[in-house]
Amino acid sequence: MRSGVMTPTALESLVLLLRDRGYRVVGPQVRDGTIVYDELASTAALPRGWRDVQAPGRAGLERRDDDALFGYAVGASGWKRELFPPRQRLWEAVSDGDASFHVVEAPEPDQPLAFLGVRPCELAAIGIQDRVFLHGLAEDRVYAGHRRGLLLVAVECHAPAATCFCTSIGTGPGLDVDADGVRAAGSAAHATTPAPAVPDLVLTELLDGEHRLLVRAATDEGDDLLAALEHREATTGDLAARAATLEAAQAAIDRHLEVDGLHDLLLGNLAHPRWDDVAARCLACTNCTLVCPTCFCSTTEDTTDLTGEHAYHERRWDSCFTLEFTHTGPASVRTSTRSRYRQWLTHKLATWVDQFDTTGCVGCGRCIAWCPVGIDLTEEVAAIRATDGREVTA
Amino acid sequence: MTVAPELPVSDLLTSRPYVVSTVRQQTHDIVTIDVRPEGEPIAFVPGQFDMVYVYGTGEAAISASSDPATPELLSHTIRAVGGVTQALNELQPGATIGIRGPYGRGWPLAAAEGRDLVIVAGGIGLAPVRPAILAALAQRERFSRIALLVGARSPRDLVFRDDLDRWTADRRIDVHVTVDSAVRGWSGRVGVVTTLIPRVPFDPEHATVLTCGPETMMWFTGEALRKRGVDPAQVYVTLERNMKCAVGTCGHCQLGPVFLCRDGPVFAWPEVADLLGEREL
C-alpha cells in the first residue's frame, strides 16, 4: 500500500477525483456556529482555521492561529445522519382500489458516498452501527444501501476537545495501518473496544513548519486514489512529526471513563441513588441520543398523500428518553426520567456488550457537550463507582 | 427451543398483502381476523408474531392465533388499544392488510414431549397459545396430560368461547375456566386464574407450562407454579412491548440485554424473571 505526503491544495484534487468517480462527497464545514458534516462542494468549505470548544453543556467555535483544515475534534452530528438518515422511507403501499394495495420497496440510493475527515472514534461508531444494521437478524436495506460502496477518508485527531475520552475506550486519537489492517493508535484496546470501520485513506495533518498531509492507503481503492494524486515520499521527519502530533493529542485528553468491570458495575447498581440524582438534572430532551454516533433507535410513521393512493411507511430516529418510547397497550413501561436515563446509560455501556459484543460508546464526548444541563456520563459512572452499591449490600 | 423458519430478508422487512376473509367479534373490543395470502402461504411456529399493517395507518405486532397446520388461513386476534389496532377492529371482509413475519422464538412444544403440558392463559392471552393447543391436540400421543387454565376479567371478556366449549367436550384436554368477577347467568368458577393452579391435576415434576397474559398475571402464575413444585425452567412466558421493526434494530422492545422481538417473545421464566422484577426496566 502506498503512503506519502501531499500539500493541502492536493486535497482539492482528491475531492474532484472522488466526484469524477461518481461519489457524493461529504465533509466538515462551519454552519450555525458549529461544525457539521454535509455535502462538500470544495475544500474551500472545510473549517480552515477553526477549533471547536466543547465542555459539559457547551459547544462552540473559536479561531485558531493557524490554517489547520482539521483543527477541531468532532462535528456536532456524526456521519450517522448520512448512513442512517433521520427520516427514511422503508416502503410504500400503492392503492389498487377496492381496499386492496401492493407494496413497493424504497429505491436504493443512486450515488455512492465518500466521507472526508472521519475521526478514529467515528470509524469505531460506523463499525458499531455496521454490527447493528448489517450483521443482525436481517440486513437493513436502507443502511446497507448507503454503506455499500462507502469510501472513507479518515483524519487522525490532533485537536481533541475537553469532552473527548477516546483514549479510555481505545478508539483513538490515531490510527495504525499495517498488513494486519487498521486499528486505533494512541490508546490501549479493551475486551469491549469496537473494531473500526476500515478507512480507504488515512490522513494526518502536520502543522509543524510546512502545512502538509501525511497520507496512508489502507485499501486497494485508497491505494488507487493515492496513485492518482500528486504526492511525495514520506521522510523520517514526516513520520516523526506524525508521532509527535499523535503524542500531543493523546496527552491533551484528560477526561477518563474507567471501563474495567463497567458492565457488571452498572447492572449491579440498578437501584443506586445516583440515578435519582441525575434524573433531577436530566431534562429528557433526547439531545444526547440524537448527537450520539451509535444510538440506533427508531420508530415508524405512516402517512398517505392527499389522493390517498399512496401510503408511506417511514422510519425516523427515536429516543429512549421519550415517554412514548415504551408505550405498550395502555401505558408506558419507563415513566420516570430516572428509568430512562438508566436505560440509556446501561444500554450504551453495558447491555450493548451483551447484544453486540462491543461497547456502544466511542468516547467522542458529543453527549456531554450537547446536553443542555451538562450531564457528563463519565462523571455519572465515576459517582456510581465511588459508591458501588454491590459492596454496601454484600 | 423452536426457531423461526428461514425467510428471505425482504420478507422480514417488507409487508406482503393478505386479503381478509372473515372478521369474528370475540368481545366488545377484540376481534379475530382471518386472512389469506395473495402469494404462497408462509409457515409459522406457535408463539411467533407478525407485524400487521393497515393501509396508511401503521403496523402492530400481533401473535398468530390460528392453526399452524393451515398457514393458508392465518388468524390474528386483536384488542383495540391504539390507532392501528382500532383500525384492525374496524376491518371488513375483502379488505387487504399487510403482514410481514413471522418473527421470534415460539413455544417449546418439542421440549414438552412426554411430559404434562399445562397452559395458563389470561384474557386475550389465550390467542398466542391457541396455535400451541391446536398443535398439541394434533399430536396428542406425544404428551402426557394436557391441561388448559383460562382466566378472564368477566364472562364477556372470554375469547375463543367456541373453542373452549369444544375443548371442554374433548376428553383429550382438561379445561378449567374462571373469571375474576361473575355476571348473572355465569355458573362457572370465580377467582383469578392462579387459584386454579393448586387444584388442576398434573404432575409438577413432569410438567411444562406455557403462560400468556398480563405481566402481573404471569408473575403470580410463576409463583403459584413454584409453590406447586414446578421447576421454573419448565415455565415459559411470552412478553409484549411496542415492537416497531421486529428484527432487533429499532430498540423499542429491549428488556435489559434482551430484544423481545429477536430473543423472544417466548422465554423460559429464569431468563427474564430478574429483568421483569426490576421496575421500569
Image (tube, rainbow, N blue to C red):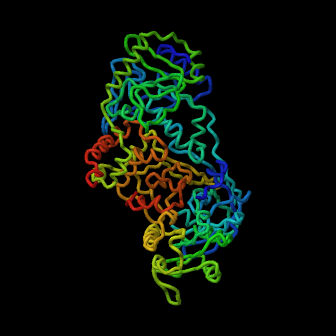
x then y, percent, for residue B278: 38, 59
Up/down of A247 relative to A321, above or below:
above
Is residue A74 visible to us here?
A: no
Q: Quadrant of residue B5?
A: bottom right
- Image quarter of the N terminus of chain B: bottom right
Q: Is residue A266 left or right of residue A20?
A: left
Between A273 and A286, the residue placed more toward the observer is A273
Image point (53%, 79%), residue name:
B201
Placement of A49 over or under B156, stated as above or below: above
Which quadrant would the C terminus of chain B be assigned to in this image?
bottom left
Q: Residue at x 69, y 60 (%)?
A: A100
Q: Quadrant of residue A52?
A: top left
Q: Nearer the viewer, residue B181 or A309?
A: B181
Please give the count of numbered marks on the rendered protein: 0
Q: Is residue B184 shown above or below B52?
A: below
Write down the quadrant of residue B136 in the picture.
bottom right
The residue that appears at 35% across and 25% down in the rendered structure is A250
Rendering coords of residue A196 (x, y %): 49, 32
Looking at the picture, how far across and down is residue A29, in whole percent? 44, 28
Relative to residue A169, is residue B107 drawn left or right? right
Q: Is residue A284 visible?
A: yes
Q: Position of residue A199 (x, y in %)?
A: 52, 27
In the foreground, A265 or A122: A265
